[in-house]
Image (spheres, rainbow, N blue to C red):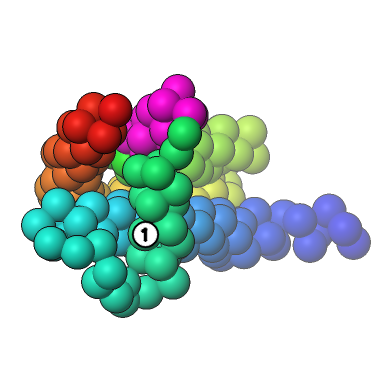
């Protein structure tokens, strides 16, 4: 009885839908991760840019993340330990620079999951195979649809974020460098 249900699951659409569902869940996780990190990079870029051009640092941040970044920037700017301040600035740079590799990781993972479905479908088709063409074609749907799902999700994620991430990460790096240079100049002038 269990073997019959498993065969129906594999031969029918059950395994294909399950595998495509896993790919979609990974896509959603990637989308949420990249959106959260991009929001942080944008908030950091905007806040540091505002501090670079504003005469007074009393401007009001627009979000909770911007408040947090403003407070952290103030702590770095007024830190008595220059090594700690430099470490914090480097941590900003490193977090911003990890965004583009994160996109590459997620898109590659989605493609690999699609490929895994292809190989799994072909392996099941060959294992079940025999003389029955219907048994051979069932698992091949898994191969085709998981490849399509993996590639489509990968392409969609790249289309959503590839250009944005590059532009925002570059802007963020430049604002961090300029802000840090200004911070060091102030510190040198005060000393």
Residue 144 at x, y = what percent? 38, 50
**Bounds of the magenta segment:** 81-93
**Above-or-below relation of 102 to 43:** above
Quadrant where the image shows the N terminus: bottom right
In the visual, does 174 lie left or right of 5?
left
Q: Residue at x 56, y 33 (%)?
A: 123
Q: Residue at x 23, y 27 (%)?
A: 188
In the visual, does 166 lie left or right of 87?
left
Q: Residue at x 12, y 62 (%)?
A: 55
Taking the magenta stretch, the answer to whether it contains residue 92 is: yes
**Above-or-below relation of 62 to 105:** below
Q: Residue at x 19, y 64 (%)?
A: 56
Judging depth in this view, the residue of 86 and 156 nearest the camera is 86
Give the secondary structure at mark 1. helix
Judging depth in this view, the residue of 46 and 73 nearest the camera is 73
- The furthest residue to the right: 1
Quadrant where the image shows the C terminus: top left
**Above-or-below relation of 90 to 144:** above
Does the rendering let one see residue 92?
Answer: yes
User: Which residue bears the numbered disc 1?
Assistant: 70
What is the crowding at mark 1: few (fewer than 14 residues within 10 Å), some, or many (at least 20)? many
Residue 156 at x, y = what percent? 26, 58
Dominant SS of magenta comes to helix
């Amino acid at each position: 009885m269990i073997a019959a249900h498993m065969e129906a699951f594999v031969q029918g659409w059950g395994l294909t839908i399950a595998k495509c569902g896993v790919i979609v869940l990974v896509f959603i996780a990637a989308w949420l991760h990249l959106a959260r990190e991009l929001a942080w990079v944008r908030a950091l870029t905007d806040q540091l840019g505002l501090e670079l051009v504003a005469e007074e640092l009393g401007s009001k941040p627009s979000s909770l993340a911007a408040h947090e970044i403003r407070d952290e920037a103030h702590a770095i700017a007024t830190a008595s330990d220059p090594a700690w301040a430099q470490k914090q600035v480097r941590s900003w740079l490193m977090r911003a620079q990890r965004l583009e590799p994160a996109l590459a990781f997620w898109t590659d993972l989605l493609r690999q999951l699609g490929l895994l479905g292809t190989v799994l479908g072909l392996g099941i088709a060959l294992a079940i195979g025999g003389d029955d063409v219907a048994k051979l074609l069932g698992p091949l749907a898994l191969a085709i649809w998981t490849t399509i799902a993996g590639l489509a999700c990968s392409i969609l994620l790249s289309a959503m974020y590839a250009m944005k991430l590059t532009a925002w990460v570059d802007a963020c790096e430049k604002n961090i460098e300029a802000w840090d240079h200004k911070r060091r100049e102030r510190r040198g002038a005060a000393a």
